[in-house]
Image (spheres, coloured by chain):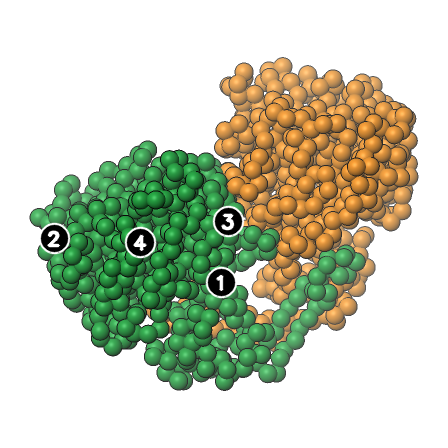
Chain colours: A orange, B green
Amino acid sequence: MKTIKFSLSALGLAIGMAATGLSMTVSAAEPTLSKADFEKAQLHYFQRCAGCHGVLRKGATGKNLEPENMLKKGQKRLEKIISLGTEGGMNNFDDLFTEQEISNLATFIQMTPPVPPEMSLEQMRSHTKEYVAPKDYPTKPLHGLNWKNFFVVIERDAGKAAIIDGDTKKIVSHIDTGYAVHVIKGTEHHKKDTAKDVGRFWYTIGRDGKVNKIDLWQTPEKMLVAETKMAYDARDIAVSGDGKYVIAGGYWPAHFVIMDAVTLNPVKVVSTRGYNTKGEFINEARVAAIYTAPNESAFIVAVKETGKMLQVDYTDLDNLTITAIESAEFLHDGFFDPSGRYFQIAANASNKMVVVDTKDAKLEKMIDVDSLPHPGPGANWIDEECGPVGGTTHLGIGLVSVWGNDPINNPEQAWKLCYEVETDGAGVFIRTHETSDYVWADQLKHPEPEIQQSVQVFDKKTREIVKTIRVTEEEGKAALHMEFNADGTEVWVSVWNRTDAKNPTGEIVVYDAKTLKEKARIKGLTTPTGKFNVYNRMHHKT
Amino acid sequence: MKTIKFSLSALGLAIGMAATGLSMTVSAAEPTLSKADFEKAQLHYFQRCAGCHGVLRKGATGKNLEPENMLKKGQKRLEKIISLGTEGGMNNFDDLFTEQEISNLATFIQMTPPVPPEMSLEQMRSHTKEYVAPKDYPTKPLHGLNWKNFFVVIERDAGKAAIIDGDTKKIVSHIDTGYAVHVIKGTEHHKKDTAKDVGRFWYTIGRDGKVNKIDLWQTPEKMLVAETKMAYDARDIAVSGDGKYVIAGGYWPAHFVIMDAVTLNPVKVVSTRGYNTKGEFINEARVAAIYTAPNESAFIVAVKETGKMLQVDYTDLDNLTITAIESAEFLHDGFFDPSGRYFQIAANASNKMVVVDTKDAKLEKMIDVDSLPHPGPGANWIDEECGPVGGTTHLGIGLVSVWGNDPINNPEQAWKLCYEVETDGAGVFIRTHETSDYVWADQLKHPEPEIQQSVQVFDKKTREIVKTIRVTEEEGKAALHMEFNADGTEVWVSVWNRTDAKNPTGEIVVYDAKTLKEKARIKGLTTPTGKFNVYNRMHHKT
């Protein structure tokens, strides 16, 4: 390992740190890989490890994997951890990688992490493509379908988004997108300035930073209308209330990019590198979540490693005003309360739900909850005792935490834990609908197949689990992520074909929201993941 | 040169850049230095080169000095350039360094630049020192002197600040400060919320990032009351309008730090790393200038390499609002107009004066001027034709540029060049006073001693030079920086003992502001540089 350290010791300054000389050590013991194996391990690391551990391996949701720590563990121990996982939350990878691939990964993380390149605005713009010219956009839907009950569905491992007709349950189109799309967002109703044709345009963000624009009024084969790329690694995206801008956040480079929503051409890039809540500089300060404030002309950008919630005013990009709200690490994902004023987001390593007041652009509260909260799309409903409440699942424990979220009319209950519901396994997603008596939680993080394949439903009134639904029993499959249809009469649950991820053998199972009985299975999908019902999303029905 | 590049090519992504494989090349031709010579060259580079070329050597006011460019030039050519300078603005260093030192510097810049370390808030706080406890601060001046006519004077190469009594011209105290202090600022009158005992406390920022607090009410030996350190390399400092916070800007790390003005303990650090106006990421995005807006509860932070003017609201540090105003590169130094609303700053490589409207936190205008504007403390006065005007000297040409700066009452002339005055040589500082008929400009950048040692004075009415004053004739000395006394009857000019910088053989020459005749010489100063008259600065008399 070759390290070059900078020294100002010659200046005779007491700089209070260890860098007191030019140190150039080449450790003879550093493990090596062939160029081909290194690149393959790097790819596997990027696809399966970087999300939790970071490309620079400084750790976040996962542990620090820098060489000085990994060399101590050694090759054999690392291989075992990668193969079998740990009780601390590390997944097992023996079903996804060969023994040789695991061995190479174990070697790779003992080597110096390669620093990825930067990406300039000009480089991003070189990826901007127009598939349909804006002047050729139709003025009304070109198909006779009820597009407001469409579901836009991530087909994770196919690099596609499926458009599914919620009325007929038929797949309208598979659209090419970036790799492993994390989130898809459409234009939404906004208190100040709702976009024209709200709900029509949808935007996908791939894990590879590719951004695609979908026009739901087009004929199926022409729905993909524009494309660009804003990072090498990315997670979230949002559309401004007025529909003029799209914003996407990078894991690497650590920045957010504002694009023209018509052409997708990047117009502004802002670095999120900075200091965490302890005042330490973080180079890999990743954008975990981005939302549009429903009541304000502002984006909310959550920076994972710095614990900063950025409220970004999008009304003047040349004189860009950002309020950096200090909260807690590591920020992950969140959702608005029903009023649209408060954003509730998990700071998972701190076991807190952070609440931001977008009206005053300030921290409203931090709520202590159990291990590793993760609400996904989140859920808001009315509790008889606490009034309006929000809820989250947890990555670290089978539990749904529920808190009051109406400080105006129920100040006594606001931002305090109201109650908890124990589930069989740790989960990733929670969901409900204003017309439903129930709240649904998945259990994707549980290692046992029968629990991972089941979702649990609890009653809003009794606060008790009324049904455990085994969504699939097939080997290598898992159940995750719920979404209601437009009128709230159905709940759609995804089934991941985890070990057969190259084929369209995943499915969505549709349940009656009242009887909780299975209604239909939509086949022919590859690792279906997040699902976004157009009507519910454009009206903030969470 | 060992380089490790990151590759995502295995992902099959068209990332549009050259990094398409793991490249580990060790060039056999890379020049080397012994550890001792490397550290000494690194120190010399930091002290004399980094200001213009950057520690990472990517260039700013000076050219890019990265190894790929330097290796092409070669050892002999580099030695010649360092020795003799260039017509492009590079200084000669044959009078400051030995031949061997120049040779080592030439070798050093062909080697990979060492990346300096970061500095955390905790590291900064470990440098905070209390010399006088706030509870022991006097409630009235402890000396019988007219402290409002004190001059606080930078003794650059001594790492000291001298306090000089403007009435008696006697040196009250030499105070230990950081290395090569760049700027000293005191509390000022503020439209919204002026600090208690305004003008009493002064804050120095060393090039080594050391911050010192001076209490002018103390007895001379106790004037230094507190200290901290906020960077390894720094340039500017300011005090909030209410006197509660001190802010200082780092060259490295690229950040600004807000400190408690009582104790100097750092409370907030914000990175300035980000994208320049072309959308390229800049790691070394240095804070060139920091001012307090006289009418707003905000700091103005100029980031040199990104061309961004940050207006930082200091009323809520936990929910910190910053407006990033896009302007031009490379921002350097500036001054407010007489109304306190508009900040006028040089973007020297763009040959522009940038004007920011602090009331609306937006770019007001960019004025095209001649080569490399550099106003230093700046000068505002009334012109018979154009009304209120501002003026700047230029590093690149012997010229004073004058523009209208009153958009409210003289909109026709505002932010347009009104006239120019040719001087004998390129300069660094300009100054006037509301009671004076004249404007003074130095010529520090001119290579010929007789011009470098002379300042020029022009008449506000006739716009013509009325006198060239040879401030010193001694070899190795130069004249620079003018400051008026409190009632505007005197002009103080510094004389640098450039080649004898280790001894107190510099001086300040005092002139009658009306007759322009010499009145006094204040001896016993080491490289006196910037001078700050308490009364003028606390009332924004520029």
Between the C-alphas of marks 4 and 2, the distance is 31 Å
Marked residue nearer the N-terminal end (3 or 2) = 2
10 Å crowding of disc 1: few (<14), some (14-19), many (20+): many
Name the residue type under label 1: Ala
Mark 3, residue position: B327
Mark identifier at residue A95: none
Relative vertical location of residue B153 with respect to residue A445 in this rendering, above or below: below
Between the C-alphas of marks 4 and 1, the distance is 33 Å
Looking at the image, which is closer to me, A136 or B170? A136
Q: Position of residue A314 (x, y in %)?
A: 59, 36
Between the C-alphas of marks 4 and 3, the distance is 30 Å
Q: Residue at x 76, y 57 (%)?
A: B14
10 Å crowding of disc 4: few (<14), some (14-19), many (20+): some
Mark 1, residue position: B60
Q: Position of residue A197 (x, y in %)?
A: 75, 27
10 Å crowding of disc 3: few (<14), some (14-19), many (20+): many
Looking at the image, which is closer to me, A512 or A173? A173
Marked residue nearer the N-terminal end (2 or 1) = 1
- Numbered disc 1: what chain? B
